[in-house]
Structures are given as structure tokens and as C-alpha cells.
Image (tube, grey):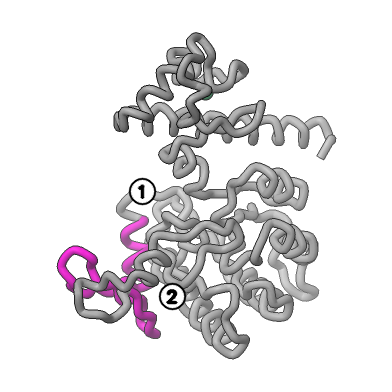
Amino acid sequence: MSSGGDDAAAVGGVEGGGGGDGELKRASSKKKGGGGGSPPVRVTEEGAIFRSYRDGREFLLTPESTVLAQKSLGADIIIPLDELPPYHIDRASLVDSVDRTHRWEARSLAQHLSDVREQAMYCVVHGGVDRELRTRSLDYLTSLPFDGYAIGGSLGKDASELSDLLRWMMPLMNANVPGSDVDRRSKPRHLLGIADEPSVLDAVINGIDTMDSCYPTRLARHGTLLSRGGKVHIKSGRHSRRYGMPIDPECGCSTCRNYDRAYLWHLFKAKEPVFMTLATIHNIQYMNDLMARQRQLILEDKI
Ligand SMILES: [Zn+2]
């Protein structure tokens, strides 16, 4: 997949937009390639070659094999294999990367269409922050029969560049190509790898329908809990005696209904693995509530 840091099918240098670092970026930068010294990720026309950090064995991930893997997992929405070039890549390399990703996406679509199985496939629009390349990517990919459009690749160096990107790109997504019978407006739009609250709210305003990111669950595992009153850093000693106080009194999740901050502080300090489960349940509920409020605002015509 694309920018989502924990998504297994992304190959490349940096995670888009959110500023976090993906698993593959860390693997690349540390060069833990089984002791052989070569990077664990190599991109060829055929696909991406990975070197196992366990035993150094190489294996090839192709557009076709990633589609088959997602099909066997029962994915409702399949994202094609794409390359995620770093933000500071030179333009010629970015053009090569986008063109290769387009070829990979076309191969993925052919694989998918040979056995659809009530599963959907989205394209991933690339081009970094280069408007000409983004437009070219959008025009090419929306001419193919994908079920929805995802925005991937580098989404800018910070939240404001992401916001700028969406502000000029989303109207393009709403504009049908003259002479084409593809109704772009009818397809869902997905933003890959973004889930921090300000960016989520901005993306919704700009017309994004869905997003995915490891951000809320990763925050949870590291002890940062989302709440309507701001982020709660549970490791702080100030929570150690907050008996009877849930993470967020307005949250209806099972963690907030059954456990207080003092107990969660204890679990975190004691490195109890159950903390990660309880914290993850809460952060996901928080994001669900956040998106439910956005849907309601849309229904009320306030967005
Ligand atoms: Zn909760």
C-alpha cells in the first residue's frame, strides 16, 4: 500500500505527509539486511525485493502477488503495490517512479479484474507535491476502471503542505475529463497514511471520504491517549493517583467505562502488555467518534 507507515505493500523511502517514519524506512536506513550490508528493499520493474531481517533471505513482492495476498486475506478494498519516493527526490527520479508505479497499478488492476470476488480496488494517485505529475497521475489512473481513488506518495513536508495539496487537487478530482464517460465525483476518495486530528478535519473539509493510518494505535502503544480535552500522556506521574477518572469522560469505550487513569498509569509503568490493548481500544473509539461527528456535520450542512 502507500503512505500508511505500517502498511506492508509500500516500498520506498519516507512515509507521506504525516511526518512519521514507516517500518520500511527504518529498515532501509538501518541497513539490517541480514548482515549482508545491502539494503533490504530494492525496486525493479518486476517488483520489490526484500531481504529478511531474520535470516537475510531475499523475496520478491510483485504487483500480482500483493493483490493475491490481499484477496486471500479477504480485503474489502485492495490497494495496489506502489513505490513511495522520498520528499526530496529529484524530479527525473520522481517521474521514473510515478511511471513505474502506474505500470504496477495497471498490472494490479488486471490481476484484480481476473477474479473480482466482490472486492474493490482503489488506485493510488502519485506525484508528490509536483502539480504537473499529480495531474498526470490523476488523469491516467482515473481513466482506468478502479473503484475509488486514493491519494498516496509524498504528501508534503508538513501539515500545511498537505493542506495546500488537497486544496488544489480535490477540485481536480471533482472535474470530469471532457470526452470521458468516467464520473470522478461518483468514486470515493481515500487519503493514505494520515490520521492526526488537525489533518483529518482539514481533509474532510477538502472532500476526503476515508483515511487510514497506524497513527492512533501507535500513539496508544506508546502511552499517548486521545481525548476531547487534549492528548493524555499516561506516563506522567500526575495520573498516578487519578482514581475514578477515565481517559475521557465522554468516551463510551470499554476502557473508559472500566478503568481509570491511575490504573492505566500503573499498567504502563509496569510494562503490562494489556495496557497496549486497552489504550488501542480507546484511541480507535476516539477516532470513530471524531469521524461520526464529521459525518453528522456533513448531514447538517455545516461542512
Ligand atoms: Zn475511551
Q: In the rendered structure, which segment of residues is drawn in magenta?
A: 41-70
Q: Is residue 280 left or right of residue 51?
A: right
User: Label 1 is placed on what type of residue?
Assistant: Gly
Q: Position of residue 198 (x, y in %)?
A: 69, 45
Q: Is residue 282 left or right of residue 191?
A: left
Q: Nearer the viewer, residue 76 or 154?
A: 154
**Residue lying farthest to the front in this orientation:** 237
Q: Is residue 36 magenta?
A: no
Q: Is mark 2 within 8 Å of ligand 1?
A: no
The residue beneath circle 2 is: 107
Query: Can residue 145 be seen in this snapshot?
Result: no
Q: Is residue 44 magenta?
A: yes
**Residue lying farthest to the right in this orientation:** 302
Q: Position of residue 14 (x, y in %)?
A: 50, 68
Residue drawn where x is 45% and y is 44% of the image: 218
Q: Secondary structure at mark 1?
A: loop
Q: Nearer the viewer, residue 65 or 146?
A: 65
**Residue lying farthest to the left in this orientation:** 55
Q: Position of residue 217 (x, y in %)?
A: 46, 41
Residue drawn where x is 44% and y is 52% of the image: 119
Q: Secondary structure at mark 2?
A: helix
User: Label 2 is placed on what type of residue?
Assistant: Arg
